[in-house]
Amino acid sequence: MTAADRLPQGEVRRILDEMDGVQWKQAEHLARVAARGVAGMEGEDLLLEACTVLLGGRRRYPPGEHPLVVLKTLMRSLASNARRSAWAKGLNPNVSVEPEPSEDDQEESGMRALAGGAVDRVSPEDEILDKEQLDAVLALHGGDAEEEAVLVAWALGMRGTEAMEMAGLDAKGYDAVRNRLRRKLAPFMPKGRNS
Amino acid sequence: MSRKNTYTEQLDQLLDACLQELLGMPAEQVLAGENAEVVKARAVDRLNRAAAEAGRRRLAAARARVQARASTARPAGLRISATDARAYIHRAAQGRQHTLAARNLDEMSDEDVLRIYSQMIELEGERSADDDDPGTAS
């Protein structure tokens, strides 16, 4: 990794400081979704940890990347690590789980793995844990079959007309389902929570 | 369009889609009844707490590195006697290359003397590297 691949810490802080209230609210909504299925972790915990890791320089901030994309990628990774830690502790409560490694550490270990011939960095355990987290996010549908179909289409990488057709909906129905899902992604917060 | 179908990739794609939906929402819907200024104030507080915690972690990591270095700095590989190391440290102290209370030198254990010697050698190595680095500010 070269210095050109990552922003200086002061620049990272400046970008995060410049995010407005709407963008931070989007980040909070996304954090709540990303934390689904992670025991003992709320969206706020996840978002705070992501900010801590970014400001601590333990993950690179690619120049030009949208801050919400950076936060999304990082929160997804942190949530997976938290699930992996919880899983390891469940197997053996005495096991010492390593803290979140820095990106440099990860790259170093990745290079060692490649040198050792271990090319695939997604382990079967990762797949199982990601399946559980995927199910937790898909559960946003709350039993609504149409919403579930759209979420599954999105998970398969489909968007727009393709997702609509996969879910067996017409344009009007797809828009209605999207609107319902959007209300679940950004649930109404009573005014009393403002203070 | 290439399709990715492992659970890991599906989770990535689903979160991507959620982000795209959030980005496509009108501000009022995103705010969901909250005031943008209140959200922003909460974010500033969050960033301040995150910066403080990042600083604490950096300090803890630096301390751990120093401790690890100190514990592994036993100069087992040094090919020098404690007597010669003591003499070297004494000369360095006189030459003011290092700040050291030389009067304590004779009271130190051989192990401590050898450890200090190895740290001085390491420090001097780093200084030489800095001196050789044309990019290092003088």
Image: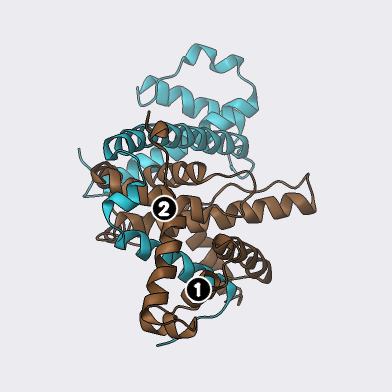
Chain colours: A brown, B cyan
In the image, B18: left or right of A152? left
| A155 or A186, nearer to the observer | A186
Q: Which residue is mark 1?
A: A155
Of B107 and A60, the residue lying toward us: A60
Q: Earlier in the sequence, mark 2 or mark 1?
A: 1
**Does residue B3 appear in this view?**
no
Residue A111 lies left or right of residue B47; in this view the side is right
Quarter of the rendering occupied by the N terminus of chain B = bottom left
* Amino acid at the residue labelled 2: Ala
Mark 1: which amino acid?
Ala
Q: Chain of mark 2?
A: A
**Position above or below: B4 against A123:** below
- Residue A100: image location, x then y, percent: 55, 49
Count of labels in the image:
2
> Residue B95 appears at what percent x and percent y?
35, 23
Q: Which mark is residue A96?
A: none
Residue A133: percent from the left, percent from the top?
60, 61
Q: Is residue A80 left or right of residue A128?
A: left
Q: Where in the figure is residue A46, as x and y percent of width and height?
A: 50, 46
The residue drawn where x is 51% and y is 42% is A45
In the picture, which quadrant includes the C terminus of chain B? top left
What residue appears at the point 51 percent right and 58 percent down from the top-left corner?
A: A77
Which label belongs to residue A186?
Answer: 2
Callout 1: residue from which chain?
A
| SS of the residue under disc 1 | helix
Task: Decide if residue A69 is on the left or right side of residue A147.
Answer: left
Q: Residues within 10 Å of mark 1 (few under 14, many from 20)?
A: many
Instruction: Please tell me in which quadrant of the rendered image residue A174 appears.
Output: bottom left
Residue farthest front in this picture: A172
Q: At 62% across and 35% down in the image, what residue appears?
A: B71
